[in-house]
Amino acid sequence: MATTTFAIIRDQIIVKIKAITPTLLAGDKFDHVPKRYTVEEYVDSAGGSGTLRRFDLRRSGMVETLPHLGTSEIMREEFALLTVAYPKTLGRYGMNDRLDMDDVIRGDARQIRDTIMSTGNFVSGQSEAQVTIQEPERGDSTWFQSFLIRVLYLEAQSLT
């Protein structure tokens, strides 16, 4: 059977999110923060400027090995946390400010969830992706929308 790694799945998710054309404010695309930053660190360093829809994706929690009948591969269950930044800028999201900002975040959340869960976007060896949309963290200058992602995949087993 085909096998994969978390790194390959993570990189595929990043590519697919960057390819999304948002339903609202379509000119502002999703973009991954530089690898040396978390999204929160990036927003702090940039002062909020140019941070709309900047995101990061990182492992979260333990790696679990699940029962599997194969001899050369093991079933892995891993969790990742995806966080997207939305700076609070008056008039940026529309005439209704916070209400329009909330609409943009909710629309983006649905598109991100659907993209990650679409089996057509899975890599070979990946069998599942579940997404839990969390309540946005509403900071004074930036809101952060987070997603808990659970992935199942087959990983090559090194037998010695």
Image (cartoon, rainbow, N blue to C red):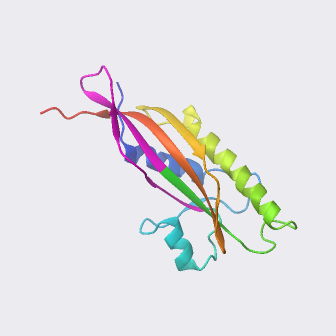
Q: Which residues are magenta?
A: 54-80
Q: Is residue 158 above or below residue 48?
A: above
Q: Is residue 25 visible?
A: no
The residue positioned farthest toward the left in the image shown: 160
The residue positioned farthest toward the top in the image shown: 69
Horizontally, is 62 left or right of 160 in the view? right
- Residue 57 lies, in percent from the top left, at 48, 55
Whether the magenta-drawn stretch holds residue 126 is answered as no
User: How many discs mark residues in the rendered view?
Assistant: 0
- Residue 135 lies, in percent from the top left, at 64, 53
Image point (56%, 60%), residue name: 55
Q: Quadrant of the C terminus?
A: top left
Horizontally, is 144 left or right of 150 in the view? right
Image point (65%, 58%), residue name: 136
- Residue 143 lies, in percent from the top left, at 65, 65
Quadrant of residue 5 within the rendered picture: top left
- Residue 159 lies, in percent from the top left, at 16, 32
Whether the magenta-drawn stretch holds residue 70 is answered as yes
Is 37 or 102 nearer to us in this picture?
102
Is 15 or 63 nearer to us in this picture?
63
Quadrant of residue 37 within the rendered picture: bottom left
Q: Quadrant of the N terminus?
A: top left
Image point (24%, 23%), residue name: 71
Is 61 or 159 nearer to us in this picture?
61
Magenta: main secondary structure equals strand
Q: Is residue 128 visible?
A: yes
